[in-house]
Image (cartoon, rainbow, N blue to C red):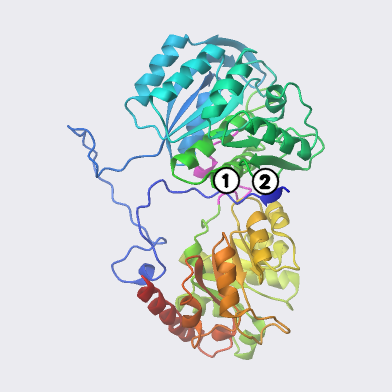
Amino acid sequence: MASTLFFQPFVLSSPTPLVSYSPLRAFLPGRLSPHRRSVSLSTTVMAEKPASATCTKLPHVLTVAGSDSGGGAGIQADIKACGAMGVYCSSVITAVTAQNTVGVQGVHPVPEKFIEKQLESVLSDMEVDVVKTGMLPSLGVIKVLCESLKRFPVKALVVDPVMVSTSGDTLSAPSTLSGYRDELFRLADIVTPNLKEASALLGGMQLQAVSDMSLAAKSIHKFGPKNVLVKGGDLSGSTEAVDIFFDGETCYELHGSRVQTRNTHGTGCTLASCIAAELAKGHPMLHAVKAAKAFVESALHYSKDIAMGSGPQGPFDHLFRLKSSPYNVEPRLKFNPDDLFLYAVTDSGMNGKWGRSMTDAVKAAIKGGATIIQLREKEMKTQEFIQTAKACMEVCQPHKIPLLINDRVDVALACNADGVHVGQSDMQAHTVRALLGPGKIIGISCKTVAQAEKAWMDGADYIGCGGVFPTNTKKDNITIGLEGLKEICLASKLPVVAIGGIGIGNANLVMEIGMKNLKGVAVVSALFDRENVEGEARKLRSVLERVFSGAS
């Protein structure tokens, strides 16, 4: 049976951790908070000797592909994609093409001997982590590459079996099919054919449904690659962009939104390069595939209205993260699981009881050390809720505290909140993602292992687990206890925040269960049903910090 996954929002992973961060250290004197980083610039001096073992090694991808004079695909796309993912990219050029948004006007293959020389130059000297292939114009080039990889082994090989350009122009000889199937695939860690390429590799098999893609992925896996990703971007009749990932045991359906744009030239090259970049950083394969898919979708969303060239297919902007985005592709705050440390959930009824506004409550919670805020409002009219949420956003932004909206995707969109938290009976996470777009934070309430597993497959960023203890904020709320919390943490692939009846008197018991992915506690009445929100937040934070300090 296939598993269904909905992509995670694109988050740039740092190739080398520079700061060991904990929520406690962020608030201790002399420590470096991730929200308050300072950068020191110094003059670079050319070293007289080779880099020592203490120097930082950059993750390194070598792309072996053709040059696209239009800059949208080929090595140009590969280098830009790797750069956007924070990875160094070198290149071996297999062919020089004359192409633009109209199509390919000419192909000039590079002699095989010179391709071999390029491969030797880079592989023998520059500590390549991952090789990614694109256009390999002949069987001879495939043989040269295979021999080079045997001489100079790398950590991973990503094969994008480019045969036909996006515009329909042939880019490789028919003999390359046997080279892929009989030689290169058996060396590959993953191959990434689109529907046409998968069909060609399988002798003309028709791929007209997701079930056909699953069968194709399993069939291609028999040629020897460790993993197969069949890309369904061209699948007719599909309202989503569905890809099939097969790891030799399980077929995963990877769902994303289908972006309506002409600017799709180079998507296949970019996807494979992003996978290679994530592998070069040391990430596991499925993570790499999901991160790559999310990056491509984000880039397409940003670039959907770009005008470049007069042909049917234009390029997209790989460096969208450097610019502001009307689609909010780049969030103000990248999701950091450590932000779940002290998760404050507001309650207007409690605030009204103590005669304070929502914004005053949020200010006090932040001042007391809250690391993330969720606005939960069941009674307020929509327009009033939107105005209140906007005011709270103005409070949170200067402190770089994420603000989430409980349940109400419409309110989150209207106030440009950092994300949404939904329950089991609310809108599903993949639907929320389609509405909010890539880059927003999505949390889901879970009480069972099955719900936690589904949250991961649906593309949530974290789960709220509980109620851990009995609570008065929700009627008939089933409690799971500390053992239930521990069971779900063990099963969850996502960060977890505990919720339900938690306060100063028992927060230590929650955090002391010793689960690495349990990142904090979420509280409602322990803060907002008290006269002094700031003071209670400080006390609760102190309890959490003592537990955290003892654990570390």
Q: Secondary structure at mark 1?
A: helix
Tag 1–tag 2 contact (CB < 8 Å): yes
Label 2, on which residue?
A: 252
The amino acid beneath tag 2 is Tyr
Residue range (magenta): 316-330
The amino acid beneath tag 1 is Leu
Q: As displayed, is residue 364 above or below residue 304?
A: below
Label 1, on which residue?
A: 286
Left or right, residue 16 beside residue 196: left
The CA span between labels 1 and 2 is 9 Å
Q: Secondary structure at mark 2?
A: strand
Residue at figure coordinates x 24%, y 42% from the top left: 53
Q: Any magenta on residue 154? A: no
**Which image quarter is the C terminus in?**
bottom left
Spot occupied by residue 229 in the image (x, y as percentages of width and height): 63, 36
Q: As displayed, is residue 474 above or below residue 237?
A: below
Q: Earlier in the sequence, mark 1 or mark 2?
A: 2
Task: Say few, some or many: other residues with alpha carbon within 10 Å of mark 1 (under 14 / 14 to 19 / 20 or more).
Answer: some
Query: In this rendering, does residue 370 appear at all?
Result: yes
Q: As displayed, is residue 326 above or below residue 383?
A: above
Spot occupied by residue 279 in the image (x, y as percentages of width and height): 48, 41
